[in-house]
């Protein structure tokens, strides 16, 4: 009953913890004289990177630091200045093994989808120059979606539904109620819901938990439960129909969705 899955990339299929952009954001702001924390950098994750930079820079405490350093509030020209530093740093980061390796269980899940005839597409908050370096590395590991819609390809990024609609139109898949979107961030879940698709959130492999795979393996069950609860709350609030730990658990999530479909349930619009 599910005909296609549209995947996000970092924190969803590869780069456990979605860690590649973090140092790049911090370094870009640092080079322009303002320090930001990892939590500051992670806050709007999932959005197109210029939108992400805008939300970080206009946060009250960061805007105040920017004004003290530069004599004006954070504005459009400043977004471009930060982005000009950030993008090359992120391009370099995604090419490392740490940030380009598929998350454990991803290949098995992709193979499971292939056996069931479920088609694979993707959307991302990364720009096309970043993805031109990352996508070939993913392809060597078995992740080659039919379509890859990047931030900047369309007039509006997440949580707007345009990237999802473009992916589905390119694949020739409709209605949206036959599609599952997988993501680790609230903007990516919002994208799914705005598009009318089923939304599956990944709690432990993504941005909200934010740990590397090694760090997660070393966490206690109590710590994992706390991270899972926090991520589940945020992803559910954004509209996720199902939340699981990682891509390894997607077959179970799809089984639940198909049971709901069999009962006549549809994904509904955001807020429904």
Image (tube, helix red, strand yellow):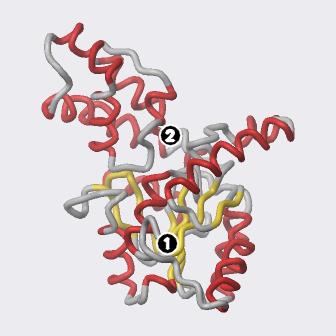
> Is 131 above or below relative to 216?
below
Q: Which mark is residue 20?
A: 2
Query: Quick one: 270 or 105, which is closer to the camera?
Result: 270
Query: Percent position (x, y) of residue 253?
Result: 69, 72
Name the residue beneath numbered marker 1.
6
Query: Quick one: 181 or 117, which is closer to the camera?
Result: 181
Quadrant containing the N terminus is: bottom right
Element class at badge 1? strand
Looking at the image, residue 217 sits to the left or right of residue 37; the answer is right
Of badges 2 and 1, the one in the foreground is: 1
Q: Residue at x 56, y 68 (%)?
A: 143
Q: Which quadrant of the structure image shows residue 111? A: bottom right
> Is 193 above or below relative to 158?
below
Mark-to-mark CA distance, 2 and 1: 21 Å
Query: Percent position (x, y) of residue 112?
Result: 70, 80
> Is 156 above or below relative to 28?
below
Q: Residue at x 41, y 58 (%)?
A: 124
Single out the residue that lies furthest toward the top: 68
Looking at the image, residue 22 sits to the left or right of residue 131; the answer is right
The residue carrying pointer 1 sits among few (fewer than 14), some (14 to 19) or many (20 or more) residues within 10 Å by Cα, namely many
Query: Percent position (x, y) of residue 255?
Result: 72, 80
Q: Earlier in the sequence, mark 2 or mark 1?
A: 1
> Is 34 above or below relative to 192?
above
Query: Percent position (x, y) of residue 186?
Result: 48, 52
């Amino acid at each position: 009953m599910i005909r296609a899955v549209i995947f996000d990339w970092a924190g969803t299929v590869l780069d456990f913890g979605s860690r590649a952009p973090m140092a790049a954001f911090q370094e870009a702001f640092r080079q322009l004289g303002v320090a930001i924390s990892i939590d500051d950098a992670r806050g709007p994750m999932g959005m197109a990177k210029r939108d992400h930079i805008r939300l970080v820079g206009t946060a009250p405490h960061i805007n105040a630091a920017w004004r003290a350093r530069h004599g004006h509030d954070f504005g459009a020209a400043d977004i471009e200045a930060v982005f000009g530093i950030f993008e090359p740093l992120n391009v370099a980061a995604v090419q490392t093994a740490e940030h380009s390796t598929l998350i454990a269980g991803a290949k098995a899940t992709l193979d499971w989808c292939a056996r069931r005839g479920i088609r694979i597409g993707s959307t991302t908050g990364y720009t096309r120059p970043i993805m031109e370096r990352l996508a070939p590395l993913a392809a060597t590991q078995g992740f080659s979606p039919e379509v890859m819609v990047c931030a900047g390809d369309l007039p509006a990024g997440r949580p707007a539904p345009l990237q999802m609609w473009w992916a589905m139109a390119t694949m020739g898949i409709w209605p949206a109620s036959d599609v599952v979107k997988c993501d680790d961030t609230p903007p990516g879940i919002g994208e799914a819901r705005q598009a009318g698709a089923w939304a599956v959130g990944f709690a432990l492999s993504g941005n909200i938990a934010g740990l590397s795979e090694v760090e997660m393996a070393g966490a206690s069950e109590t710590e994992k439960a706390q991270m899972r609860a926090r991520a589940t709350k945020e992803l559910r609030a954004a509209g996720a129909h199902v939340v699981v730990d990682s891509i390894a658990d997607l077959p179970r999530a799809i089984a639940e969705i198909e049971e709901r479909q069999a009962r006549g349930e549809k994904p509904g619009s955001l807020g429904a």
